[in-house]
Image: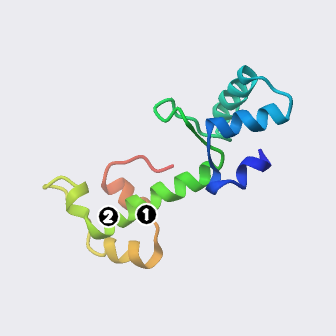
Amino acid sequence: KEELLEVAHGMVTLDTCEQIGIKLGMGKQEVYQCIEYLNSLSLFLYFHVLPHLVFTNPQYLLDMVTSLVRISFIHYPEELLTKDLVLPPGTQRELIRKGLFSEELFLYLSLEFF
């Protein structure tokens, strides 16, 4: 896992995983089982819709998705919200200033806050 974390922000090809597995004396089937196991523990993220990529640093991927959503809310809220739903006053200013979504915003948008 350490070797994979150092590569491209934790995003590697399935071929790279196979090569590392071979270096460790694993067969292809064992590599796939290992990826599925680590995926089940959320240590890796593997999506069958992206069959050639393995995300070995889930936090990096989550940070990037969060940044995209935050930037979209700051600059293009009308693209994300329905016409009858308007952001509370000061929401965009808080997102710019703090860079975080508040629990109140999740509740306002009727989203579950984790």
Residue, disc 1: 101
Residue 72 place in picture, x, y as percent: 32, 63
| Lower sequence index among marks 1 and 2 | 2
What residue appears at the point 83 percent right and 36 percent down from the top-left corner? Answer: 23
Amino acid type shown at disc 2: Phe
Measured as percent of width and height from the top left, residue 45 is found at 59, 39
Label 1, label 2: how many angstroms apart (C-alpha)?
A: 10 Å
Residue at 78% over, 49% down: 3
Tell me if 100 is positioned left or right of 17 in this view.
left
Residue under label 2: 73
Q: Is residue 25 above or below residue 87?
A: above
Classify 10 Å Cα crowding around label 2: few (below 14), some (14-19), many (20 and above): many
Q: Residue at x 34, y 77 (%)?
A: 93
Between residues 16 and 88, which one lies in front from this camera angle?
Answer: 16
Task: Give the camera-side residue of 63 and 23.
Answer: 23
Q: Amino acid at mark 1?
A: Phe
Name the residue furthest left.
83
Residue 19 falls left or right of residue 65: right
Q: Say if mark 1 contacts mark 2, CB within 8 Å.
A: yes
Q: Is residue 89 above or below residue 29?
A: below
- Numbered circles on residues, count: 2
Could you tell me which secondary element the residue under label 2 belongs to?
helix
**Res 39 seen here:** yes
- Please state which of the two labelled residues, at mark 1 or mark 2, is closer to the viewer: 2
Q: Position of residue 26 (x, y in %)?
A: 81, 26
Mark 1 neighbour density, 10 Å: few (under 14) some (14–19) many (20 or more): some
